[in-house]
């Protein structure tokens, strides 16, 4: 297991307006997948713009342990020499995924498709997260859980069958991680593996599998869902992957620019895949001044420069079916809502309770600690905004090993009447290692305890 890091509190204070042009780091979802498909391709995959955050570095180490040669050539520039589908070797020691749900769950799918045994572990947050949602479909494909902690949690040991079975699986929860784990296991199963999702989730695995030469078809399913079919046992060919800027990270300077009066910020090259843009849609409904400029295609996805100007926001009702397109953005949306005029109701947030922390509870507690009126009704979070103002003043928002809780409340501090301190900023390095430099470069006043 990762050794527990020493907590470092951080504080953000209101300063002048934010201004400048910045690029958020590479997309975390795509970075994990590029390393994993690089491992499964025959030959040399090149990745540019890889997110060099702790979560992704853990996946890079796991890919190495499973047989790939992984080399960093320069900032964000990586080379992966893969072993091919079917060519994995059993790792000598447990794979430690730290804080990373995506890396651990997708790699469980990879292992389950191969006749090898591997152990998975992580930090206290990852050890508390549900893994049955992954292990159940992988068992249908022939994998065995040799050993697991209570409730099928980490640390656990998984053993793949001699020959994985292709299945048709309807995901019980909207989860790109579950979908991806099944597809990755299906890569080494003879025949067609099918995943049906009632609500479409981020489609990076499907897109990237195609870019690496796999045969994948996607059809609509019902009102909001999709059916994805993968033909097993392809020889994946290596690809050149250019990783676009992560919309889930860009969300922090974006909301900071909206709520710090007088700000104008441009966020370059942000991925605008429609399955990731729920936050921008919602903020625009709230009246936010966000324009998409220079819309273009890059690395197989749509990207745009987002030009953001501060201005008044109004409360809105966010429908539950939008959740998969902005699942990681609710904490920062709640901060925007705290500065809006009137009430914002975010519906259907059950999945937030099983992230790095129980984000529904953590956001609610952080809002209340900062003098913001909020309540939880069932799976809904309701925030009453202060019409351009929020009190702030929390002396130590509890972040529970959750990077997005830490960044969200630091952004609140950049515009609140009193400074906001979070109890631990170390986890920010899992997804946004340049957060403090980037926000500071825009004029934000943030300080981490030495
Ligand atoms: O597939 C992915 O890259 C991710 C899927 C989402 O999780 P779920 O699949 O649990 O919804 C998201 O919260 C996570 O940050 C990244
Ligand atoms: C939920 C997240 O990531 P993961 O599931 O990969 O830990 C996140 O980054 O907000």
Image: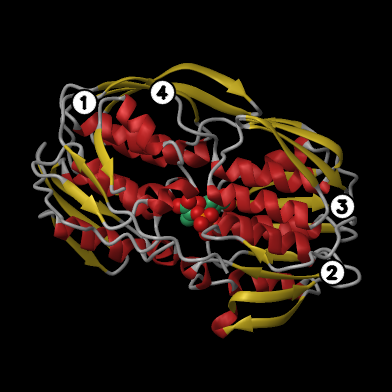
CA gap, disc 1 to disc 3?
A: 49 Å
Residue under pointer 4: 22
Q: Is residue 223 at all visible to an observer of this figure?
A: no
Q: Position of residue 239 (x, y in %)?
A: 78, 33
Residue 114, quarter of picture:
bottom right
Among numbered discs 3 and 2, the one appearing first in the sequence: 3
Residue 284 spot, x, y in % from top left? 30, 32
Secondary structure of residue under mark 2:
loop
Local crowd size for mark 2, using a 10 Å CA cut-off: few (<14), some (14–19), many (≥20)? some
Task: Give the structural element (helix, strand or loop) at label 3.
Answer: loop
Instruction: Name the spot of residue 391 as percent of width and height, x first.
Output: 8, 47
- Residue in the picture at 11% in, 51% down: 393
- Neighbourhood count class around disc 4 (C-alpha, 10 Å): few under 14, some 14–19, many 20 upward: some
Q: Which residue is mark 2?
A: 116
Which circle marks residue 310 in the picture? Answer: 1
Q: Is residue 171 above or below residue 15?
A: below
* Nearest-to-viewer mark from 3 and 2: 2
Report whether 254 appears left or right of 72.
left
């Amino acid at each position: 297991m990762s050794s527990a890091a020493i907590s470092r509190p951080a504080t953000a204070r209101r300063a002048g307006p934010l201004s400048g042009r910045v690029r958020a780091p590479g997309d975390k979802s795509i970075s994990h997948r590029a390393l994993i498909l690089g491992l499964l391709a025959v030959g040399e995959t090149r990745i540019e713009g890889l997110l060099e955050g702790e979560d992704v570095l853990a996946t890079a180490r796991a890919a190495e342990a499973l047989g790939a040669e992984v080399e960093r050539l320069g900032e964000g520039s990586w080379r992966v020499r893969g072993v091919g589908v079917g060519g994995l070797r059993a790792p000598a020691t447990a794979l430690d995924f730290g804080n990373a749900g995506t890396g651990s769950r997708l790699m469980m799918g990879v292992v389950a498709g191969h006749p090898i045994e591997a152990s998975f572990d992580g930090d206290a947050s990852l050890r508390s997260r549900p893994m049955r949602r992954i292990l159940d479909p992988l068992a249908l494909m022939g994998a065995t859980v040799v050993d697991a902690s209570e409730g099928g949690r980490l640390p656990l040991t998984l053993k793949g069958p001699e020959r994985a079975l292709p299945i048709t699986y309807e995901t019980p929860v909207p989860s790109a991680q579950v979908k991806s784990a099944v597809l990755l296991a299906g890569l080494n199963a003879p025949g067609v593996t099918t995943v049906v999702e009632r609500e479409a989730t981020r489609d990076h695995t499907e897109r990237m599998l195609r870019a690496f030469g796999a045969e994948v078809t996607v059809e609509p399913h019902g009102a909001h869902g999709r059916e994805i079919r993968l033909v097993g046992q392809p020889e994946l060919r290596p690809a050149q992957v250019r990783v676009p800027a992560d919309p889930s990270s860009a969300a922090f300077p974006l909301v900071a620019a909206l709520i710090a009066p007088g700000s104008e910020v441009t966020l370059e090259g942000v991925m605008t895949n429609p399955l990731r843009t729920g936050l921008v849609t919602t903020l625009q409904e709230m009246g936010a001044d966000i324009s998409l400029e220079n819309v273009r295609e890059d690395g197989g996805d749509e990207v745009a420069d987002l030009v953001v100007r501060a201005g008044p926001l109004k409360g809105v009702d966010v429908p539950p079916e939008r959740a998969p397109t902005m699942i990681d953005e609710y904490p920062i949306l709640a901060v925007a809502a705290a500065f809006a005029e009137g009430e914002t109701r975010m519906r259907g947030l059950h999945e937030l309770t099983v992230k790095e922390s129980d984000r529904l509870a953590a956001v609610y507690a952080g809002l209340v600690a900062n003098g913001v009126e909020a309540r939880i009704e069932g799976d809904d979070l309701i925030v009453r905004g202060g019409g351009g103002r929020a009190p702030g003043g929390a002396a130590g928002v509890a972040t529970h090993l959750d990077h997005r809780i830490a960044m969200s409340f630091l952004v609140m501090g950049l515009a609140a009447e009193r400074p906001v301190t979070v109890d631990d900023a170390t986890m920010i390095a899992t997804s946004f290692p340049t957060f403090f430099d980037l926000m500071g470069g825009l004029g934000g006043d943030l300080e981490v305890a030495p």
